[in-house]
Image: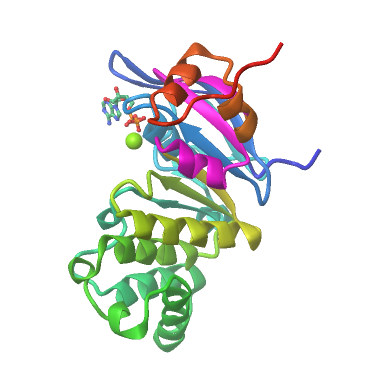
């Protein structure tokens, strides 16, 4: 078995009386893509933030390349830091409204790669172009870009760190259908280049397209895990069955004995 890139064991998170995440265990191999699905409030974003190093869990352990992510008060110490990057549903979470897309990506480039300003500009223009954002749009502030462009710019910013793992929390839910397709194609291409992706979505079609394995969350708990096609075609847990049945025009295939 290949050593996992990231693994979480018995992770739990409480906010006062709310158990946002309970006893979550999962792992992702290098170059793999996994999905996390579940309705709103099921704990997906909390788990994502814990995996990304943004929120120490109340209990449990997260390992990245076999090393604890939370070592004392610092998450992802030293060179591990840049290897895990997060993309949020709202790209304003990672793009400064007062900075052009180019400046935002170049800033991350200089921070992570310690390159000169000129070098950062060239690399950032290249990265943005790969995300489908040309030099003119690259020099616009986020509010002058379309939702899809903003989201792709925030992916470019995340990629400027040359991460091994991208954690994307509902990246397609705030953008229109054609922008969604464009972003999904991008992710697909990145997977082909060896990036690992943890994709959080309540859109099962998105998960099906990109994630080889899926974890279904309900009330903070992972209730079902498996190969995406198996889980979606033959859901075992009643919650997963209900989730799939709730999609218009989609029914799980008959479970044969
Ligand atoms: N910072 C927080 N403080 C208090 N409660 C929170 C906080 N973040 C999330 N929660 C609660 O934890 C539960 C899970 O939320 P969340 O992880 O955002 O779920 P999802 O992303 O699946 O919608 C919800 O009940 C939410 O209200
Ligand atoms: Mg969420």
Asked whether residue 69 appears in the rendered view, the answer is no
Q: In the rendered image, which quarter contains the N terminus?
A: top right
> In this rendering, is residue 149 above or below 233?
below
Asked whether residue 208 appears in the rendered view, the answer is yes
> In this rendering, is residue 198 above or below 14?
below
> In this rendering, is residue 250 above or below 200?
above
- The percent position of residue 153, horizontal first and vertical second, equals 36, 66
* Front-most of residues 206 and 39: 206
Work out which residue is located at the far bottom of the displayed protein and give it. Answer: 118
- The percent position of residue 10, horizontal first and vertical second, equals 56, 21
Q: Quadrant of ligand 1?
A: top left
Is residue 140 within the magenta segment? no
* Front-most of residues 15 and 191: 191
**Magenta range:** 202-226
Mark count = 0
* Front-most of residues 163 and 73: 163
Q: Residue at x 60, y 19 (%)?
A: 254
Q: Residue at x 37, y 50 (%)?
A: 172
* Front-most of residues 101 and 247: 247
Left or right of 20: which side holds 225? right
Q: In the rendered image, which quarter contains the C terminus?
A: top right
- The percent position of residue 29, horizontal first and vertical second, equals 68, 43
Quarter assignment of residue 132: bottom left
């Amino acid at each position: 078995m290949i050593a996992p890139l990231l693994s979480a064991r018995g992770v739990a998170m409480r906010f006062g009386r709310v158990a946002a995440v309970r006893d979550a265990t999962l792992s992702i191999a290098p170059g793999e893509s996994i999905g996390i699905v579940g309705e709103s409030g099921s704990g997906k974003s909390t788990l994502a933030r814990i995996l990304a190093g943004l929120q120490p869990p109340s209990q449990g352990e997260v390992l990245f390349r076999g090393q604890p992510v939370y070592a004392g008060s610092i998450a992802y110490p030293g060179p591990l830091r840049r290897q895990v990057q997060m993309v949020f549903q709202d790209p304003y979470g990672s793009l400064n409204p007062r900075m052009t897309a180019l400046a935002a990506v170049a800033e991350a480039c200089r921070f992570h790669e310690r390159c000169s300003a000129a070098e950062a500009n060239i690399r950032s223009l290249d990265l943005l172009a790969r995300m489908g954002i040309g030099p003119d749009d690259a020099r616009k502030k986020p509010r002058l870009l379309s939702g899809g462009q903003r989201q792709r710019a925030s992916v470019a910013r995340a990629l400027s760190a040359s991460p091994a793992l991208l954690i994307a929390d509902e990246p397609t839910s705030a953008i229109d259908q054609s922008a969604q397709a464009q972003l999904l194609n991008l992710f697909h291409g990145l997977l082909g280049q060896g990036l690992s992706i943890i994709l959080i979505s309540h859109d099962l079609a998105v998960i099906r397209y990109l994630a080889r394995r899926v974890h279904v969350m309900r009330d903070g708990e992972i209730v079902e895990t498996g190969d995406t096609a198996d889980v979606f075609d033959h859901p075992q847990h009643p919650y997963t069955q209900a989730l799939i049945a709730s999609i218009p025009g989609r029914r799980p295939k008959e479970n044969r004995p």
